[in-house]
């Protein structure tokens, strides 16, 4: 009942605000997340594709880490980076010039993941 009440209270205030604007409750949540994790940055977005795309650009383009490991048969979205992260040829077919740096592992294939991580860190 408390959850329903809080949702109704929020709907009476505002339903959605772009990240372009300062949102005090969002800032409060970001601080809470930072204090409860080992992270030093919070980025709120409205889709997993947007989150994955931002992560790809942060890790690969800015930091210079050139391999991201995803799973075969996975689905991550329909942006260029998330199409590439998707481990399915049938989803990628028809899209060309996909970004480089994605490797695909079989589910629970820890030896492959360790091999990729070792090679990336050398």
Image (tube, rainbow, N blue to C red):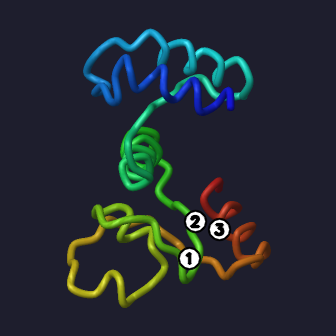
Tag 2 near tag 1, CB within 8 Å: yes
Q: Which residue is mark 2?
A: 69
Q: Which mark is residue 116?
A: 3
Label 3 or label 2, whichever lies nearer to me, is: 2
**Residue closer to the observer: 1 or 48:** 1
Tag 3 near tag 2, CB within 8 Å: yes
Counting the numbered discs, the total is 3
Instruction: Name the element at disc 1.
Output: strand
Q: Which residue is mark 1?
A: 104
Instruction: Name the element at disc 2.
Output: strand
- For the residues labelled 3 and 2, the Cα–Cα distance comes to 8 Å
- For the residues labelled 2 and 1, the Cα–Cα distance comes to 6 Å
Residue 19 in the figure: left or right of residue 3: left
From this view, report whether residue 22 is shown above or below residue 61.
Answer: above
Looking at the rendered image, the quarter that the C terminus falls into is bottom right
Name which of mark 3 and mark 2 comes first in the sequence.
Answer: 2
Residue 19, image x and y in percent? 32, 25
Residue 111, image x and y in percent? 78, 75
From this view, report whether residue 82 is shown above or below residue 94.
Answer: above
How many other residues sit within 10 Å of disc 3, few (<14), some (14-19) or many (≥20)? some
């Amino acid at each position: 009942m408390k959850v329903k009440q809080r949702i109704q209270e929020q709907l009476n205030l505002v339903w959605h605000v772009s990240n372009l604007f300062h949102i005090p409750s969002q800032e409060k949540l970001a601080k809470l997340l930072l204090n409860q994790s080992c992270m030093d940055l919070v980025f709120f977005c409205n889709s997993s594709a947007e989150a994955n795309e931002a992560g790809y650009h942060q890790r690969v383009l800015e930091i210079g880490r050139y391999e991201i490991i995803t799973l075969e048969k996975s689905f991550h979205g329909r942006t260029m980076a998330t199409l590439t992260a998707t481990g399915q040829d049938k989803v990628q077919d028809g899209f060309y010039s996909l970004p480089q740096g994605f490797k695909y592992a079989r589910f629970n294939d820890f030896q492959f993941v360790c091999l990729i991580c070792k090679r990336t860190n050398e």
